Image (tube, helix red, strand yellow):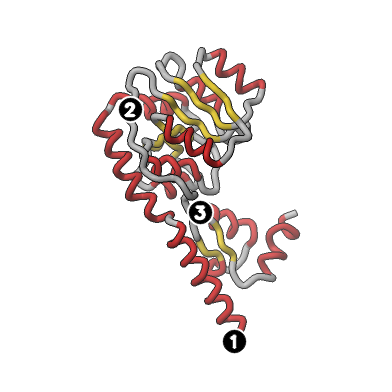
């Protein structure tokens, strides 16, 4: 499988563009191609994600969870982590029976929505107080950037691509440790200065992911490849 899906295609291309340094290392491991072939070009922040100031609800904040894939979105641990915290978990995605049972077992107040339009997803970010994205595996982690762009504090994982994407603009937690997730969420809720620091850092961080910057990086790579093939 590795030969057909990774190694043979890698031998037939001039360059490989990937969405994070973490993904680059994964490609190099499996494809076994020359390191200089694999270039990191991040995903751009989607249209419409702009600052939307909102007073933080410290009494009962709305935590936005984007994605429900059972193998990595970590909802069961998040449910355990927020047990007893006055909050509401707003979930984008269809839950599995196991995830619903975990939320109910931990007495978590939650909503789930799916098949949303782009505008409806954007509104979810604007309505929430915090983005919780304690995933156990990501090649990039778009909700981090979307939360940054909207002006919401982000709690995300300290593994895979997520620290790379977040920089200093998120509270990093261990996604496999419920107590770590809980501490991160409570710090954002209870520490006004820290929360505002994350928001300010988010506005700076999201500049890396502007569409014009990403487009220019792809254009430069295409010109480089064209130049090499022409010679």
Note whether 40 is above or below 90 in the view shown: below
Residue at image coords 49%, 56%: 42
Q: Which residue is mark 2?
A: 56
How far separated are the C-alphas under marks 2 and 3?
28 Å
The numbered disc on residue 43 is: 3
Disc nearest the viewer among 2 and 3? 2
Task: Answer with left or right where residue 172 lies relative to residue 46.
Answer: left
Judged from this view, the residue extending furthest toward the bottom is 231
Residue at image coords 43%, 14%: 84
Judged from this view, the residue extending furthest toward the left is 193
Q: Mark 1 vs mark 3: which is more N-terminal?
A: 3
How far separated are the C-alphas under marks 1 and 2?
58 Å
Q: Indicate the quadrant containing the C terminus: top left, top right, bottom left or bottom right.
A: bottom right
Q: Tell whether label 2 touches label 1 (CB within 8 Å).
A: no
Residue 87 place in picture, x, y as percent = 42, 19
Residue 191 place in picture, x, y as percent = 27, 28
Q: Which secondary structure, mark 2?
A: loop
Task: Answer with left or right where residue 111 lies relative to residue 172.
Answer: right
Note whether 231 is above or below 107 in the view shown: below
Nearer to the camera, 74 or 217: 217
Task: Answer with left or right where residue 15 lies relative to residue 164.
Answer: right
Q: Which secondary structure, mark 3?
A: loop
Q: Which residue is mark 1?
A: 231
Task: Answer with left or right where residue 25 lies relative to residue 52.
Answer: right
């Amino acid at each position: 499988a590795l030969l057909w899906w990774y190694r043979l295609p890698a031998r037939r291309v001039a360059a490989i563009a990937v969405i994070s340094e973490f993904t680059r290392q994964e490609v190099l491991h499996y494809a076994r191609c020359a390191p200089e072939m694999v270039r990191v070009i991040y995903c751009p922040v989607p249209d419409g994600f702009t600052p939307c100031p909102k007073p933080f609800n410290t009494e009962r904040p709305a935590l936005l969870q984007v994605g429900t894939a059972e193998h990595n979105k970590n909802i069961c641990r998040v449910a355990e982590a927020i047990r007893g915290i006055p909050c509401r978990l707003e979930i984008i995605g269809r839950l599995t029976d196991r995830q619903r049972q975990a939320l109910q077992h931990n007495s978590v107040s939650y909503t789930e929505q799916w098949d949303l339009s782009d505008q409806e997803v954007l509104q979810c970010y604007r309505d929430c107080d915090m983005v919780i994205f304690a995933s156990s595996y990501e090649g990039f982690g778009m909700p981090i950037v979307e939360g940054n762009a909207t002006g919401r504090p982000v709690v995300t994982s300290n593994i895979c691509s997520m620290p790379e994407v977040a920089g200093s603009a998120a509270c990093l937690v261990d996604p496999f440790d419920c107590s770590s997730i809980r501490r991160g969420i409570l710090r954002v809720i209870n520490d006004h200065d820290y929360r505002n620091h994350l928001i300010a850092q988010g506005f700076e961080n999201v500049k890396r992911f502007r569409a014009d910057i990403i487009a220019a990086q792809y254009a430069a790579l295409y010109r480089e490849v064209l130049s090499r093939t022409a010679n």
